[in-house]
Amino acid sequence: MGPHTTDAHAETMRDPSSHKLLGAPPASPRLRVRPWWFPEHELENPLVLYMEAWLAEMIFGPNRSLISEIEWISQALLRVDTVDSGKMAEITIYGRPSVKNRMKNILSNLATWHKEHHVQRAAKMKQLEEFLKSRSSNNQLKPVKEAPADRQVVPPQPLEVKKKIDS
């Protein structure tokens, strides 16, 4: 077993070329290495779709965190870019023609479902707001009346249990 070195000592022993690599700016997020499972010839003729940016966020997750999982499952490469000042998302699909069509159908079905769900939630929220407004306006107009003195409810008293004494 060799002697233990401190981090400072190991830093001085590194190859000088590694300092250049460590000091280099990070690669652009648009640059990606082609996955090993994806054939190079399928990068030609991509399919491009456009959808609203909020729908793309719902489908691909915050910060597009679900893209790699979707790519692995579907065997298609995806690139999602925001265009039109962040209002629209451009989705580029790479892969075999059948895979591109399947991804297009999946994404359009997901977009339709999310739109319908959004409309349903908005309708439910509106109904809830109307219900709460009507309930609060009814309570303000009609104050609670107290029961007359002869009809006031008296809370029940606990029952007394008496033991029968046998003599």
Image: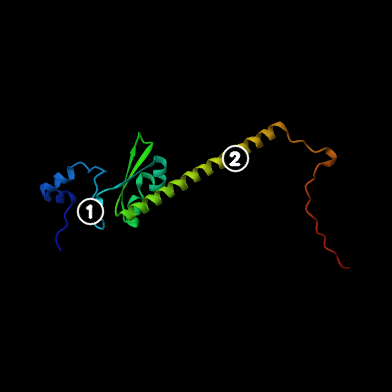
Q: Residues within 10 Å of mark 1 (few under 14, many from 20)?
A: few
Task: Name which residue lies at 79% across and 50% down.
Answer: 157
Q: Which residue is mark 2?
A: 127
Q: Does residue 100 sit above or below 165 in this rendering?
A: above
Quadrant where the image shows the N terminus: bottom left
Q: Nearer the viewer, mark 2 or mark 1?
A: 1
State the CA–CA distance, disc 2 to disc 1: 53 Å
Task: Name which residue lies at 16% across and 54% down.
Answer: 5
Badge 2 amino acid: Gln
In the image, farthest residue toward the bottom: 167
- Tell me the SS state at disc 2: helix
Q: Does residue 3 sit above or below 93 in this rendering?
A: below
| 84 vs 26, nearest the viewer | 84
> Residue 117, how many percent across, how many down?
50, 46
In the image, farthest residue toward the right: 167
CB within 8 Å, label 2 to label 1: no
Q: Which residue is mark 1?
A: 41
- Tell me the SS state at disc 1: helix
Q: Earlier in the sequence, mark 2 or mark 1?
A: 1
Badge 1 amino acid: His
